């Protein structure tokens, strides 16, 4: 948008010093021309594509302070040499941290460099010095196209990366082989549910990758239906925004699971959809993301890398769109993914099916995560809800039935003394016992509170603990004491007690609890305590019936 353009130019310029400083200048080094960072100690070929794009977009931007600086063009050419030298005969490159002869890395590079090439070619008549870099980028893309025609993928999102990259090459080089290959991937169907969830459930990384890829294909192939899953996903993502502006990532199936992540990488997704659909909500979210970046709440990148898109689109540079802000109150229930998300202003709760950390609470920047464990036959005693349902009047139920006991000797010799080869499933079972664990959650948004009823039925005498892992560094306050709460420390909330936990400008009141035993961190079979958190325990013995109330308190 027009109001964002100056900020994008500024962000792009901020990237340049590091790209110049960290480029390996040693001609004797295997990393010559690549981006060499101290934390890695080696260069990733694919990183050169982003460097080339950043350098050239600033070089060609009339509003950039370094516009026309020959040092940027020289550096881009050296990065291109590094990329070409790293390219295998089959057209692929390596992702050295994990994959080799990787066609998908060519796909990611193409998603960037195909647009860089368009920008270069738009200026080459007036800037003949661009001829060398144009030739190098085109050579890399043509070779890479051959690698994608014969290469493959690992993960669901890779399909759309490859398909979109092939589509870009079809547009650039008018080679039907690229379009036919892209259609092979598209024929598999887009793995996005009606509620907008992709297979990998990756709020922090791969949602963005999927959306970017589908938007590229929707435009070039003139298939507007490919924007539908993008719209669904972006609307779903709004229900994953936490009160502090970060994203909920604990449900991800990929490496972003549980990582603190801000939605800066979604900026191109929301901006692109805003200009495609003129939806003021998408424009409003793009604006919100930019405000977050200004405030320093960012993870990864996504703004400076947008300069090429702005330079290629007069509409992005010159048009402002009407905007509305996303609602800070919502409810999302996605039974297919086993997740509930509810938020009201500065408090949110998340419930997860099939996860030992079954409940997440966010109050401002304070995080509170709930687990339950018992001594029911070792690690079988961990509460991992098999069922999540409800929703009537903001009440939810999580439930798990457990059954275990002992095995008898074989009635007949098993034919082997090798324990691992024995048919243990045929052994008779004895002394089988049942334990039902249930949690009922009552969300009370107008009171900024949630009540957690927990109970058990079945086997008696089983040690039980509920653990509440909280953001460390605060202070626990009771009528009698104030206790600093550092990472790795813990306390037990005694029956009927009340404590207030203060962290920064937030205060959380917790009432309820029980104190029937001291088996907390050391409980056999339970998961290790979170050493980065302060943990509050409630301990009991089955049969259990208790309530924990957690509410935002006036600080």
Image (tube, rainbow, N blue to C red):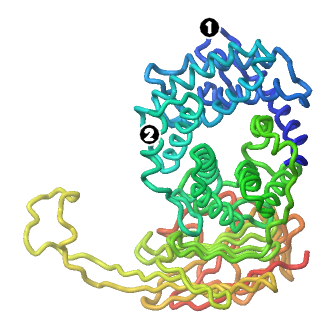
Q: What is the quadrant of residue 60 in the picture?
A: top right
The numbered mark, 1 or 2, whose residue comes first in the sequence reads 1
Q: What is the quadrant of residue 477 in the picture?
A: bottom right
- Residue 554 vertical placement versus 42 (above, below): below
Q: Residues within 10 Å of mark 1 (few under 14, many from 20)?
A: few
- Determine the residue positioned at 63% across, 90% down: 392
Q: Of all residues shown, which one is farthest toward the top?
A: 28
Q: What is the quadrant of residue 53 in the picture?
A: top right
Return the mark for residue 180.
2
Place of residue 131 in the rendered image (x, y in percent of width and height, measured from the top left): 70, 14
Place of residue 436 in the rendered image (x, y in percent of width and height, measured from the top left): 46, 86
Mark 1–mark 2 distance (CA, rounded to whole Å):
42 Å
Q: Which of 290/20 is in front?
A: 290
Place of residue 268 in the rendered image (x, y in percent of width and height, measured from the top left): 73, 48
Q: Which of 502/129 is in front?
A: 129
- Determine the residue positioned at 54% across, 39% down: 167
Place of residue 552 in the rendered image (x, y in percent of width and height, measured from the top left): 82, 78
Residue 391 showing in the rendered view:
yes
- Determine the residue positioned at 78% across, 74% down: 347
Q: Residues within 10 Å of mark 2 (few under 14, many from 20)?
A: some
- Determine the residue positioned at 82% across, 40% down: 314
Q: Which of 250/529 is in front?
A: 250
- Residue 242 vertical placement versus 311 (above, below): below
The residue that label 1 is drawn on is 28
- Residue 197 vertical placement versus 132 (above, below): below
Quadrant, the C terminus: bottom right
Count of labels in the image:
2
At numbered mark 2, what does the secondary structure look like: helix, strand or loop?
helix
Residue 467 showing in the rendered view:
no
């Amino acid at each position: 948008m027009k109001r964002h353009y100056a900020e994008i130019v500024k962000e792009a310029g901020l990237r340049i010093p590091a790209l110049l400083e960290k480029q390996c200048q040693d001609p004797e080094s295997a990393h010559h021309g690549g981006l060499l960072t101290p934390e890695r100690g080696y260069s990733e070929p694919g990183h050169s594509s982003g460097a080339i794009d950043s350098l050239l977009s600033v070089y060609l931007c009339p509003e950039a302070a370094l516009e026309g600086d020959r040092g940027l063009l020289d550096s881009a050419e050296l990065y291109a040499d590094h990329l070409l030298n790293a390219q295998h005969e089959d057209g692929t490159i390596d992702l050295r941290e994990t994959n080799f002869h990787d066609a998908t890395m060519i796909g990611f590079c193409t998603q960037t460099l195909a647009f860089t090439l368009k920008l270069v070619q738009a200026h080459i008549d007036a800037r003949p010095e661009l001829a060398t870099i144009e030739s190098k980028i085109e050579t890399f893309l043509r070779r890479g196209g051959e690698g994608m025609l014969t290469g493959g993928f690992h993960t669901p999102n890779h399909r759309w990366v490859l398909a979109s990259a092939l589509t870009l090459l079809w547009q650039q080089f008018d080679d039907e082989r690229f379009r036919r290959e892209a259609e092979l991937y598209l024929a598999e169907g887009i793995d996005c549910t009606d509620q907008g969830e992709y297979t990998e459930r990756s709020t922090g990384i791969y949602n963005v990758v999927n959306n970017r890829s589908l938007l590229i294909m929707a435009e070039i192939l003139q298939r507007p239906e490919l924007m539908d899953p993008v719209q669904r996903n972006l609307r779903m993502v709004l229900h994953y925004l936490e009160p502090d502006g970060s994203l909920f990532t604990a449900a991800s199936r990929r490496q972003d699971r549980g990582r603190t992540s801000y939605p800066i990488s979604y900026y191109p997704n929301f901006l692109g959809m805003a200009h495609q659909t003129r939806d003021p909500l998408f424009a409003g979210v793009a604006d919100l993301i930019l405000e977050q970046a200004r405030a320093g709440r960012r993870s990864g990148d996504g703004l400076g890398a947008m300069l090429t898109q702005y330079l290629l689109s007069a509409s992005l540079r010159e048009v402002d769109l009407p905007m509305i802000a996303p609602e800070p109150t919502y409810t999302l229930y996605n039974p297919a993914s086993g997740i509930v998300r509810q938020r009201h202003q500065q408090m949110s709760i998340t419930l997860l099916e099939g996860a030992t950390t079954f409940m997440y609470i966010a109050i401002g920047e304070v995080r509170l995560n709930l687990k339950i464990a018992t001594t029911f036959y070792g690690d079988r005693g961990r509460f991992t809800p098999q069922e999540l349902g409800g929703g009537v009047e903001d009440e939810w139920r999580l439930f798990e039935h457990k059954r275990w006991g002992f095995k008898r000797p074989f009635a007949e010799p098993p034919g082997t003394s090798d324990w691992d080869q024995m048919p243990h499933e045929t052994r008779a079972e004895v002394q089988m016992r049942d334990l039902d664990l249930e949690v009922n959650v009552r969300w009370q948004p107008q009171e900024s509170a949630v009540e957690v009823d927990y109970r058990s039925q079945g086997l008696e005498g089983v040690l039980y603990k509920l653990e509440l892992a909280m953001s460390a560094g605060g202070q626990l306050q009771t009528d009698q004491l104030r206790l600093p709460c550092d990472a790795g420390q813990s306390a037990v909330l005694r029956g009927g007690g009340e404590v207030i936990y203060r962290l920064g400008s937030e205060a959380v009141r917790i009432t309820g609890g029980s104190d029937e035993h001291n088996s907390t961190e050391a409980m056999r079979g339970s998961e290790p305590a979170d050493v980065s958190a302060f943990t509050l325990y409630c301990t009991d013995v089955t049969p259990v019936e208790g309530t924990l109330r957690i509410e935002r308190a006036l600080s």
